[in-house]
Image (tube, grey):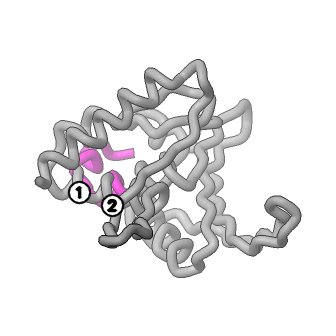
Amino acid sequence: MDKSLLNNPTLARIVADISGDGHLQIQEWRHLVSFYSKNMAEIEAVKKRFLNVFNVEGRVYFDNRKTKGVETPRYKLFFISKPVATFLRDVGTPVGNKTNIAFWIPRWVMNGRREVKAAYLRGLFDCEGSIFCRNTLKPRWQIGFCMIKNETLIESGLLYFKQIRELLTQFK
């Protein structure tokens, strides 16, 4: 894969998508990138980004597993490509169960152009962010961001959040 892609905002967005609601699996012969969403438009957007950057076609599956006893329809998007998976790993995409590993924003994103940083943040907040209104006498809208981490990795998770804050401050 071409390292000049490290200046590409769409690649930054893909890395953030996987860091949020995706999964990069590299085990023995298996090289799989996946992304999950309840929103088909989001699935199609990720599929299009992969096609544009890597010229790899994804496969969409319907997933109707039960969550807390309730059927929760969602979609799964899979990309099976060893070159793409290894490239994504090499550019800093977390591999495996993100709850149980330490990871950070890739250096090329932190030091990248404004558009690269913005694309990464957009991907993270689309996947892990929320906006809600506190029910008080004077309603206040708040932005939230949440990721689950193994207790032994809290420090690395906080460092990751500090990196996110650092990028956000660059956009005031």
Q: Is residue 116 left or right of residue 113?
A: right
Residue 93's spot in the image, x, y percent?
46, 39
Q: Toward the viewer: 44 or 150?
A: 150
Find numbered disc 1 in the image and state the secondary structure of the residue it sits on.
helix
Going 65% across and 43% down the picture, which residue do you hit? 31
- Of residue 76 and residue 164, the one placed in the foreground of this image is 164
- Report the number of discs: 2
Q: Is residue 2 left or right of residue 166?
A: right
Residue at screen point 64% across, 36% down: 97
Quickly name the residue at label 2. Answer: 122
Q: Which mark is residue 118?
A: 1
Q: Amino acid at mark 1?
A: Ala
Numbered range of the magenta stretch? 1-13
The kind of residue on which mark 2 rests is Arg
Tell me where residue 87 appears, x and y as whole percent: 45, 41
Specify the farthest residue to the front: 137
Q: Position of residue 157 (x, y in %)?
A: 45, 30
Residue 135 in sight in this render: yes
Residue 49 spot, x, y in % from top left:
42, 67
Residue 110 image-quadrant placement: top left
- Mark 2 and 1 residues: CB-CB less than 8 Å, in contact? yes
Q: Residue at x 12, y 47 (%)?
A: 170
Compare residues 138 and 89 and report the one nearer the observer. Answer: 138
Magenta: main secondary structure equals helix
Instruction: Look at the image and tell me in which quarter the C terminus lies.
Output: bottom left
Secondary structure beneath disc 2? helix
